[in-house]
Image: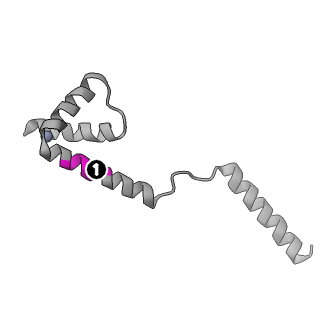
Amino acid sequence: MTACVEYSAAIQLYLDNELSGPSLEASLVHLRGCDACRVQLEAEKSLSALLHQSQPLYVAPDSLRTAIAATRHIIALAASGK
Ligand SMILES: [Zn+2]
């Protein structure tokens, strides 16, 4: 069962596409033969999909935020008649 504990960290790396070469090979071989780790992999996948759904993937750059704030300021000035 020690192996599964080690592969639990490897599953995270695998999902982040940070596994390569022999570590990737070893993890894939282990996953193929281990139901428990496959279940964990699926669970981690669903969790990460959920996190991606609940958070915006892209944040507006500061330059865009500044431009919007400036535009709002100009509109507010125009609306106030000054
Ligand atoms: Zn395992």
Give the side of residue 32 with respect to residue 61, left or right.
left
Ligand 1 within 8 Å, label 1 CB: no
Q: From the image, tell me which residue sits under label 1.
A: 44
Picture colour scheme: one colour
Indicate which quadrant contains ligand 1. top left
Mark 1 is surrounded, within 10 Å at the Cα level, by few (under 14), some (14 to 19) or many (20 or more) other residues, namely some
Please identify the dominant SS of the magenta region. helix
- Residue farthest right in this picture: 82
The answer to whether 21 appears left or right of 36 in the picture is right
Whether residue 32 is in magenta: the answer is no
From which residue to which does the magenta span run?
39-45
What is the residue that sits farthest to the front in this orientation? 32
Q: Residue at x 21, y 32 (%)?
A: 27
Spot occupied by residue 11 in the image (x, y as percentages of width and height): 26, 40
Residue 15 in the image, given as x and y percentages of width and height: 33, 41
Residue at x 22%, y 33% (from the top left corner): 28
Whole-percent x and y of residue 39? 19, 49
Query: Which image quadrant for residue 74?
Result: bottom right
Q: Nearer the viewer, residue 70 or 19?
A: 19
Residue 29, how many percent across, how many down? 18, 31
Assign the N terminus to one quadrant of the image. Answer: top left
Three-letter amino acid code of the residue under disc 1: Glu
**Which quadrant of the view contains residue 73?**
bottom right
Give the total of numbered labels: 1
- The extreme top residue here reads 22
Q: Quadrant of the C terminus?
A: bottom right
